[in-house]
Amino acid sequence: MQKKQLIQELHNRLNARLTQLKETRDGLIESRESEGGKSSAGDKYETGVEMIQQEMERTQGQIDQTERQKEALNRVSLSPNSIIGEGSLVLTDKASYFIGIPFGELKLETGNVYCISSASPIGELLTGKKQNDQVQFRDQKITVKTIY
């Protein structure tokens, strides 16, 4: 597994997520405008428009978060690391982790990688560790095998 391929796959998935979120936002804008054109009076109209507005704000928040993740991914160095930090791809005896963006589990042909933030519980434990170091996480000893 190469870090460059992993980062490219994350970019592809973030771009796909952005496209889907923007389509959702555009559909909500269209719904809000069609609701706004109705001359219905009362709470039912206001509730419908308010629900659409709340969903638009939630979707915009997800768009903003995804764009921040893309920016963080663009700052990742492809150079190998000897100490685990932001942008490290870490292979352990239990799992593989990419310390950078909280994306969750990424299923690849070469195996699964957990994309996590350095602020996550396992991310905090791994940060600063070197090859062959061990950490204790939820009653399990995890040994760092390789760092990319």
Image (cartoon, rainbow, N blue to C red):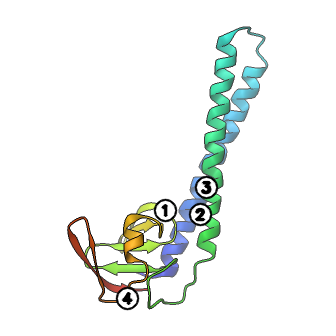
Mark earlier in primary sequence (3, 1): 3
Q: Mark 4 points at which residue?
A: 130
Q: Name the residue under label 1.
A: 102
Element under disc 4? loop
Element under disc 3? helix
Which image quarter is the C terminus in?
Answer: bottom left
Residue 13 lies left or right of residue 132; in this view the side is right
Q: Mark 2 points at which residue?
A: 69
Foreground disc of the pair 2, 4 = 4
| Cβ atoms at labels 3 and 2 below 8 Å apart | yes
Q: Is residue 104 above or below residue 58?
A: below
Name the amino acid, label 4: Lys
Q: In this view, does 1 lie above or below 23?
A: below
Q: Is residue 108 visible?
A: no
> How far across and how far down the image is residue 75, in percent?
63, 76
Foreground disc of the pair 1, 4 = 4
Q: Name the residue under label 3.
A: 65
Name the residue furthest top.
41
Residue at coordinates 63% horizontally, 74% vertically from top-left? 74
Which image quarter is the N terminus in?
Answer: bottom left
Mark earlier in primary sequence (4, 3): 3
| Cβ atoms at labels 2 and 4 below 8 Å apart | no
Mark earlier in primary sequence (2, 4): 2
